[in-house]
């Protein structure tokens, strides 16, 4: 099964999700900077969500650079990954309207956790079909950044529940720094494959 179809489909869905995300962003009620101060939290959460989606797309793209084969299980794992990303506009709009409330923050954190878990599952289904000695197998054999991300997802949710709802957004925004530059190990594995 060619991997190009799954890449093209994922690219298209992420582009649509990003478009919906910006359509949910409403302009201020006025033409002054003072009017903007009433919606600055909506703009901030939009930026965090957009950057999150861009980070997922970048890492998905890099991951598929080292993949040779896909199968039906990979398609379903990728669809789960896409499903989680399509929930971003809904959660972003809710948290934009109620930035310091627990339920929107927990939902947003749960969606990020679900997306990260789906990405991890996608990786392991790719290992199954490509083999443990393949570049993707070598990547997921020791991938501490992925494990740390899942642990931080849980910490974000617990901190939001026990300390302050905004902790969810703060921890998840800080996690973006860790993923902003795609995994260097992938580039190394990819260059070794070409030799």
Image: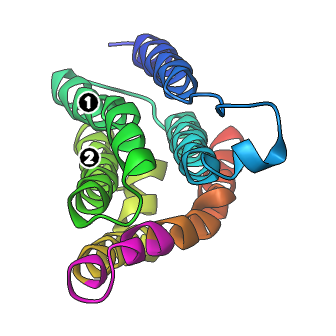
Q: Are marks 1 and 2 in contact (CB under 8 Å)?
A: yes
Quadrant of the snapshot with the N terminus: top left
Rendering coords of residue 119 (x, y %): 34, 47
| Rendered position, 119 above or below 194 | below
Verify whether residue 170 appears in magenta.
yes
| Rendered position, 158 above or below 138 | below
Residue located at (24% from left, 57% from top): 110
**Is residue 97 at least partly visible in the picture?**
yes
**Is residue 134 at least partly visible in the picture?**
no
Q: Secondary structure at mark 1?
A: helix
Query: In the displayed image of the protein, which residue is found farthest to the right?
Result: 32
Q: Describe residue 135's horizontal placement relative to residue 192 as left or right.
A: left
Which region is colored magenta? 159-171
Verify whether residue 111 appears in magenta.
no
| Residue named by callout 2 | 118
Classified by dominant secondary structure, the portion drawn in magenta counts as: helix
The answer to which quarter of the image holds residue 3 is top left
Viewer-side label of 1, 2: 1
Q: Which mark is residue 83?
A: 1
From mark 1 to mark 2, how far is it between C-alphas? 9 Å
Residue located at (33% from left, 39% from top): 130
Q: From the viewer's side, name the closer residue of 39 and 16.
A: 39
Rendering coords of residue 160 (x, y %): 29, 77
- Tell me the crowding category of disc 2: few under 14, some 14 to 19, or many 20 or more residues within 10 angstroms, Cα based: many
């Amino acid at each position: 099964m060619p991997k190009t179809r799954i890449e093209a489909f994922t690219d298209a869905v992420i582009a649509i999700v990003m478009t919906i995300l910006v359509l949910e962003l409403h302009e201020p009620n006025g033409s002054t900077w003072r009017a903007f101060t009433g919606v600055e939290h909506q703009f901030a959460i939009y930026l965090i969500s957009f950057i999150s989606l861009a980070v997922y797309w970048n890492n998905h793209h890099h991951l598929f650079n080292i993949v040779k084969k896909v199968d039906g299980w990979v398609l379903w794992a990728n669809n789960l990954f896409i499903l989680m990303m399509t929930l971003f506009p809904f959660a972003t709009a809710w948290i934009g309207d109620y930035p310091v409330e627990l339920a929107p923050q927990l939902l947003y954190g749960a969606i990020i956790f679900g997306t990260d878990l789906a990405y991890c599952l996608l990786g392991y289904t790719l290992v199954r079909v490509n083999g443990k000695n393949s570049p993707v197998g070598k990547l997921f054999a020791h991938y501490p950044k992925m494990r740390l991300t899942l642990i931080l997802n849980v910490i974000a949710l617990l901190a939001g529940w026990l300390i302050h709802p905004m902790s969810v957004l703060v921890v998840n925004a800080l996690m973006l720094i860790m993923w902003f530059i795609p995994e260097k190990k992938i580039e190394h594995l990819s260059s070794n494959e070409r030799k």
